[in-house]
Amino acid sequence: MDITHELGIRIRHYRKMNHITQEQLAEICGLHPTYIGQLERGEKNATIESIYRIALGLNIPMSKLFEDLEAIDDNPQSLPAGIYHQLLSLPHDKQQEIAAILNSIVKLLT
């Protein structure tokens, strides 16, 4: 797993959940919009200070950006990692719908 890429996916996910643009997030955080874009694409390594500012700007604890990072498989093409990334790209309400469906399927199979 490329932690820089994964962190970018998570920043983008939480930014979209907050319905703000890269430019708006950059302004809130006191960072450059280009830098936010580079972080989201995994092109730049974020400093701890930047991560802190971004978490504040997204109104989430810093730990949310690192949550369960070790659970992501080293192979981003693996099935669980692929599903995880697809879920992150969806709006929160759709994620909840899919989670309910998945829970129902797991109950049926166990």
Image (spheres, rainbow, N blue to C red):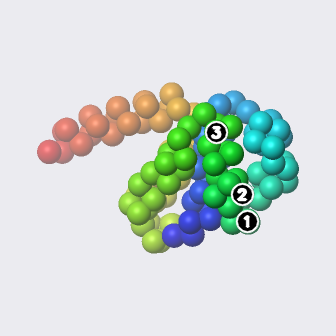
Callout 1: 10 Å neighbours few (<14), some, many (20+)?
some
Task: Report the front residue among 99 and 74.
Answer: 74
Q: Residue at x 58, y 50 (%)?
A: 10
Relative horizontal placement of residue 68, taking residue 1 as reference (left or right)? left
Disc 1 from disc 2: Cα separation: 5 Å
Q: Mark 2 = which residue?
A: 39
Q: Mark 1 = which residue?
A: 44
Single out the mark in the foreground, 2 or 3: 3
Q: Mark 3 = which residue?
A: 56
* Circles 2 and 3: CB atoms closer than 8 Å: no
Give the image quarter of residue 25: top right
Secondary structure beneath label 3: helix
Callout 3: 10 Å neighbours few (<14), some, many (20+)?
some
Farthest front residue? 49
As shown in the figure, which amino acid type bears the numbered disc 3? Leu
Callout 2: 10 Å neighbours few (<14), some, many (20+)?
many
Give the image quarter of residue 47: bottom right
Rendered image: mark on residue 110: none
Q: Position of residue 29 (x, y in %)?
A: 75, 42
Q: Residue at x 63, y 48 (%)?
A: 52
